[in-house]
Image (cartoon, rainbow, N blue to C red):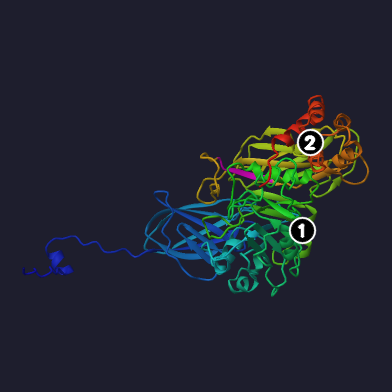
């Protein structure tokens, strides 16, 4: 069979024949400048571009220092970005984490370079605190995700993180040289850290002296592992990461290992960390309260463990760096001159706030804040709670917990366009025993593409209700006036020691204390080998005061035999 020769038609012949020839249009060029509305200085930020159909714009990638580009997203570490995209109509958003307002511009990208200038106002008052992300990864050294270390600098600066803890898996990463090379060094203080990633959990350690040996990630005994991590030169803070996540078939807070009401390690593992992640924006839970309940149980156990917020991001855009973050008390006046030791002191003292879109602060009797001990006083406690957030988010609920019991649950009228979402002073009965107080504000999660809250990492149900969160660290109340704070476990220990031989007498002696104290007493009784299901205890529990009965039953019902 003879093949017919291919038909070759030139453009002139096509035009002569009356055919219409469509020339490929050159891509449009866009130049963006973002400045701080208050200072006029260039402002690192996140740029989100949507096409006319609401999809993420097709931005041509550019490998230039200070930029990180993904579909529909450009992070600029310098406040300036130039890029190309197909011609058309677009919507541009500019954001810089929760402290800044939202910039928006609709524009037509055509044959001429489009020059866009936006000003972002600083909205949320964070004086006295610095923004910290304690859990950051790079593709370069963690081996997965998509953020190269050069791109990571743009995301840190662009989201307004001022203290950036590098926590690549089993690697000591130093951001400082790359920050200088990318022109972002003036916007944050880098800290060398490590996520010690093992078969029995993930643990962050920082700061680490550069050049130090890497902890042995093959260890599987928590006691030996924590000793190994703390022996790393320079380390002051060790945290347990995403405690409700399953890795290699192990979940740290599995109720077979960890009693969710008492904070008791059923397998005997030492929960002797300095911090625990209560909000991890790249590893959210279907039930966001789960990790808070774990933390509350540990506080009632007498553990001086601080709750932390972090991103755990490995990516440029899929999980937003600093979306969950920790605000750390600091006297620093410049983000590139933060005293890391002072920041560690604040973390260890609990002088921090956890934030994912909202910032919640609280003071007792007008002056005692997070990480502090309020002395005894006559009359009701006055608890002031202030909730802030940028104008583009809202808050709708405020809760206050005392020793883990919810004592305040009230709505906040959701209003966009305001920064202070709530500023209330609550009159609370002064407790008879020492307590800790934590305030938590929440609001509808952001779904818009400029700062979307991610879906749960390991969902436990099909529905999904994203929430913004802002919580305080504990304010401790010295209600008994002895000049120090006693935890529920401290009170329970004294009562059990004096009355363990007589269940009826024991439960009667717990009457002046709250349910959290009875939970701890039940735990101590079991560890002493007392049978809570035996007849003497059963009868004593049935006739005990309500909060004592509730505490013992809650402990017994949640008790799971460890494997």
Q: Main secondary structure of the magenta part?
A: strand
Q: For this view, does 400 lie left or right of residue 513? A: left
Disc 2 is placed on an element classified as loop
Q: Which of the 4 image quarters holds residue 289?
A: top right
Q: Nearer the viewer, residue 238 or 507?
A: 507
The answer to whether one can see residue 500 in this image is: yes
Q: Quadrant of the N terminus?
A: bottom left
Q: Is residue 271 left or right of residue 358?
A: right
- Residue at x 52% of width, y 45% of height: 447
Instruction: Read off the residue under disc 2.
Output: 531
Q: Farthest residue toward the right?
A: 482
Report x, y in % for residue 500.
Answer: 87, 37
Circle 2 residues within 10 Å: few <14, some 14–19, many ≥20: some
Place of residue 391 in the rendered image (x, y in percent of width and height, measured from the top left): 61, 45
Extreme residue toward the left, this view:
1
Q: Is residue 124 visible?
A: no
| Residue that badge 1 annotates | 330
Give neighbour class at mark 1: few <14, some 14-19, many 20+ (Cα, 10 Å). Answer: many
Mark 1 or 2, which is nearer the eye?
2
CA distance for labels 1 and 2? 49 Å
Answer whether residue 466 is magenta in the image.
Answer: yes
* Front position in the image: 405 or 549: 549
- Examine the structure image and report whether residue 462 is included in the region drawn in magenta: no
- Bounds of the magenta span? 465-470
| Numbered label attached to residue 72 | none
């Amino acid at each position: 069979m003879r093949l017919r020769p291919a038909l070759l038609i030139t453009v002139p012949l096509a035009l002569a024949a009356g055919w219409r020839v469509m020339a490929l249009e050159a891509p449009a060029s866009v130049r963006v400048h973002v400045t701080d509305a208050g200072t006029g200085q260039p402002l690192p930020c996140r740029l989100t571009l949507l096409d006319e159909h609401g999809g993420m714009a097709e931005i041509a990638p550019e490998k230039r220092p200070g930029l990180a580009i993904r579909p529909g997203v450009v992070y600029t570490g310098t406040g300036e970005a130039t890029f190309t995209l197909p011609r058309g109509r677009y919507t541009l958003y500019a954001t810089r984490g929760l402290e800044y307002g939202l910039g928006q511009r609709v524009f037509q990208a055509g044959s001429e370079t489009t020059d866009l200038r936006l000003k972002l106002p600083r909205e949320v008052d964070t004086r006295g605190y610095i923004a910290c992300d304690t859990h950051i990864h790079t593709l370069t050294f963690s081996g997965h995700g998509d953020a190269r270390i050069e791109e990571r600098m743009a995301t840190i600066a662009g989201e307004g993180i001022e203290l950036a803890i590098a926590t690549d898996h089993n690697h000591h990463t130093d951001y400082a040289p790359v920050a200088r090379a990318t022109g972002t060094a003036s916007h944050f203080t880098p800290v060398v850290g490590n996520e010690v990633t093992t078969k029995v959990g993930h643990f962050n350690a920082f700061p680490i002296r550069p050049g130090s040996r890497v902890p042995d990630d093959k260890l599987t005994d928590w006691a030996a592992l924590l000793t190994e991590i703390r022996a790393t030169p320079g380390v002051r803070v060790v945290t347990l990461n995403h405690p409700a996540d399953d890795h290699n078939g192990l979940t740290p807070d599995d109720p077979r290992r960890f009693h969710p009401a008492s904070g008791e390690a059923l397998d005997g593992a030492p929960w002797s960390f300095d911090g625990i992640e209560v909000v991890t924006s790249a590893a959210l839970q279907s039930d966001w309260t789960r990790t808070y309940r774990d933390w509350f149980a540990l506080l009632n156990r007498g553990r001086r463990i601080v709750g932390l917020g972090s991103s755990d991001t490995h990516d440029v855009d899929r999980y937003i760096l600093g979306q969950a973050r920790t605000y750390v008390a600091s006297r620093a006046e410049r983000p590139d001159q933060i005293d890391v030791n002072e920041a560690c002191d604040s973390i260890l003292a609990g002088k921090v706030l956890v934030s994912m879109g909202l910032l919640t602060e609280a003071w007792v009797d007008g002056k005692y804040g997070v990480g502090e001990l309020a002395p005894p006083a006559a009359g009701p406690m006055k608890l002031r709670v202030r909730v802030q957030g940028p104008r583009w988010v809202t808050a709708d609920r405020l809760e206050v917990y005392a020793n883990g019991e919810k004592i305040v649950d009230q709505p906040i009228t959701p209003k966009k366009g305001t920064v202070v979402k709530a500023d209330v002073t609550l009159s609370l009965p002064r407790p008879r025993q020492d307590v800790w107080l934590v305030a938590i504000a929440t609001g509808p999660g952001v779904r818009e593409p400029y700062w979307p809250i991610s879906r749960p990492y390991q969902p436990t149900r099909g529905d999904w209700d994203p929430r913004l969160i802002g919580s305080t660290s504990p304010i401790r109340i010295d209600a008994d006036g002895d000049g120090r704070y006693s935890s529920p476990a401290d009170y329970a220990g004294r009562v059990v020691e004096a009355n363990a031989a007589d269940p009826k007498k024991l439960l009667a002696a717990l009457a002046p204390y709250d349910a959290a104290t009875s939970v701890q007493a039940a735990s101590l009784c079991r560890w002493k080998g007392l049978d809570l299901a035996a007849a003497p205890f059963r009868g004593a529990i049935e006739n005990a005061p309500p909060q004592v009965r509730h505490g013992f039953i809650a402990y017994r019902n949640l008790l799971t035999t460890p494997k």
